[in-house]
C-alpha cells in the first residue's frame, strides 16, 4: 500500500479536536496530546451536571459518581489488559515512578538507560537507589545485549522507557523483563509514549510495573496510572483520607491496594475524562493509529534524509516521533521560525539531558504525531524547514 493510500484509509478526525484551529499544524503530541470533544464533554459533565464526591456520600449523586469513577478504573485497566484492582490513579507517570522508587521495600541497584526521561532518573536518585546505566545501540535503542551483561543479583530494579520520548525507540519489553527476572530484579516500564500509539497488554509484556500519563493519551492533565500485580507488596507513601482502614492516635491500618495509594479526594473528573479518551482511542483502534503514525514517520524521515543540512536521530522504526538537528541552526530558532509558518514542534533537551550529551548536541528539534496528524502537517513542516534554510543559508 502506498503512503498516500495508507493515509487516505485512516479516518480524518481533526474536526473532533477543537484545539486544532485551521492552518495550525500541531506536531508536539509527544509533549501533550490535543483533546477530542468527547473527552472535553465527559470532563465538563463530570465537573458540572454530575458532580459530587466519591466513596463517602450516601446520597444518590455521590453513589452515581462513585460508580462512574470505579467504572473508569475498570475501563482503563481493560485497555492495558489489567484487572481493576491492579491500577492506582496518580497525578502522572512522574508520581507513579516516585511512588515505586520511594515505597519499594528492596531499594538497591537500579539499571536505567541513556535515553530515559528525567522523570525516570531523578526519582531513583532522590530515593537513594544506586544507579547504573545501560548504553544504546548505534541506531538509538536500549542495548539489551549490554543490559544482560550489566545485570547482577545486586540489581533489584530495571526501569526502561517503552518508547523513547526523543528518539521514538521501541523497547522489546518481554526480553527486558526476562533479563531482569533472571537476576531476581523487577522491571518498571515508562509507557507514556507507548500507550497512545502501541497495543499494550501488561500481562503479555511480563513487566512488574507499568506507568503512563493521561494527557499524552488524549485525556486530561493531572492524572496517570500505575499498574502492577504487586501493589499489595508496597506500603503507602502518602497518608490522609481514603487510603485508610482505621485510624487511631496509636496506630493506623491501611486500605488494600489500589485504594491505599489514593490519599485524599481522588482525581474524579480526570479519571472519567481519561476513560473517555480510552473509549475514543479504542473506537479508532490502536493498531490503526500505530500504522498511521508509522506511515507519517516514514514519510518525514525520508524527506529529511534528502536534506544535507539535517541530521536524523533514532531508529528507522521510531514510533510516532522524529528528532533532528539542522547544521548551524539552534533548534529554538527552528521552532520559532516554524511557528511563524503555523507549525508547532518541540525544541530543546526534552527532559533528557543525558541523552543529549550522548548524541553530542545541546538540543534537538522534535516532531511528533497523533491521531489527528496528516500528510499536510508533514508538508507544512518540510516547507517551513526550507524557509529556515533560506534564512540561515
Image (spheres, rainbow, N blue to C red):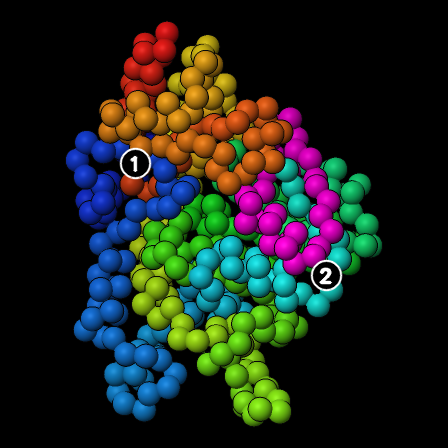
Looking at the image, residue 31 lies above or below residue 138:
below
Whether residue 133 appears in magenta in the rendering, the answer is yes
> Could you say which quadrant of the image residue 359 lies in?
top right
User: Residue 155 placed where, x, y %?
Assistant: 77, 54
Callouts 1 and 2 close, C-beta under 8 Å = no
Check disc 1 and report its element: helix, strand or loop: strand
Residues under labels 1 and 2: Cα distance? 41 Å
Whether residue 202 appears in magenta in the rendering, the answer is no
Q: Is residue 183 left or right of residue 64?
A: right
Density class for disc 1 (Cα within 10 Å; few <14, some 14-19, many ≥20) is many
User: Residue 375 placed where, x, y %?
Assistant: 30, 28
Q: Which stretch did the figure color magenta?
A: 115-142
Q: Which residue is depicted at the point 48% across and 73% down?
A: 262
Q: How many marks?
A: 2
State the residue position of label 1. 26
State the residue position of label 2. 107
Amino acid at each position: 500500500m502506498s503512503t498516500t493510500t495508507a493515509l487516505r484509509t485512516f479516518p480524518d478526525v481533526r474536526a473532533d479536536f477543537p484545539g486544532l484551529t485551521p492552518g495550525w499544524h500541531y506536531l508536539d503530541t509527544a509533549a501533550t496530546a490535543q483533546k477530542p470533544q468527547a473527552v472535553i464533554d465527559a470532563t465538563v459533565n463530570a465537573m458540572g451536571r454530575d458532580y459530587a464526591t466519591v466513596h463517602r456520600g450516601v446520597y444518590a449523586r455521590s453513589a452515581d459518581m462513585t460508580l462512574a469513577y470505579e467504572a473508569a478504573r475498570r475501563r482503563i485497566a481493560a485497555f492495558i489488559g489489567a484487572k481493576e484492582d491492579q491500577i492506582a490513579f496518580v497525578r502522572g507517570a512522574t508520581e507513579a515512578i516516585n511512588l515505586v522508587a520511594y515505597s519499594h521495600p528492596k531499594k538497591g541497584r537500579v539499571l536505567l538507560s541513556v535515553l530515559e526521561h528525567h522523570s525516570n532518573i531523578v526519582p531513583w536518585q532522590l530515593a537513594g537507589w544506586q544507579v547504573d546505566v545501560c548504553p544504546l545501540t548505534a541506531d538509538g535503542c536500549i542495548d539489551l545485549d549490554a543490559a544482560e551483561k550489566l545485570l547482577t543479583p545486586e540489581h533489584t530494579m530495571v526501569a526502561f522507557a517503552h518508547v523513547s520520548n526523543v528518539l521514538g525507540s521501541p523497547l522489546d519489553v518481554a526480553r527486558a523483563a526476562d533479563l531482569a527476572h533472571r537476576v531476581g530484579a523487577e522491571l518498571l516500564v515508562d509507557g507514556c509514549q507507548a500507550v497512545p500509539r502501541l497495543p499494550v497488554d501488561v500481562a503479555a509484556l511480563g513487566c512488574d510495573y507499568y506507568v503512563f500519563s493521561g494527557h499524552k493519551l488524549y485525556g486530561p492533565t493531572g492524572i496517570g496510572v500505575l499498574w502492577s500485580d504487586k501493589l499489595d507488596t508496597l506500603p503507602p507513601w502518602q497518608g490522609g483520607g481514603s487510603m485508610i482502614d482505621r485510624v487511631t492516635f496509636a496506630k493506623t491500618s491501611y486500605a488494600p491496594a489500589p485504594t491505599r495509594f489514593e490519599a485524599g479526594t481522588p482525581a474524579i473528573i480526570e479519571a472519567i475524562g481519561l476513560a473517555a479518551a480510552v473509549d475514543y482511542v479504542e473506537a479508532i483502534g490502536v493498531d490503526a493509529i500505530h500504522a498511521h503514525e508509522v506511515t507519517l514517520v516514514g514519510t518525514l524521515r525520508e524527506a529529511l534524509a534528502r536534506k544535507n543540512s539535517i541530521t536524523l536521530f533514532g531508529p528507522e522504526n521510531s514510533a510516532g516521533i522524529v528528532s533532528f538537528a539542522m547544521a548551524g541552526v539552534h533548534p529554538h530558532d527552528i521552532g520559532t521560525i516554524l511557528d511563524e509558518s503555523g507549525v508547532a514542534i518541540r525544541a530543546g533537551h526534552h527532559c533528557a539531558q543525558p541523552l543529549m550529551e550522548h548524541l553530542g548536541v545541546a538540543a534537538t528539534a522534535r516532531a511528533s504525531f497523533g491521531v489527528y496528524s496528516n500528510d499536510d502537517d508533514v508538508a507544512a513542516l518540510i516547507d517551513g524547514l526550507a524557509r529556515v534554510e533560506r534564512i540561515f543559508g
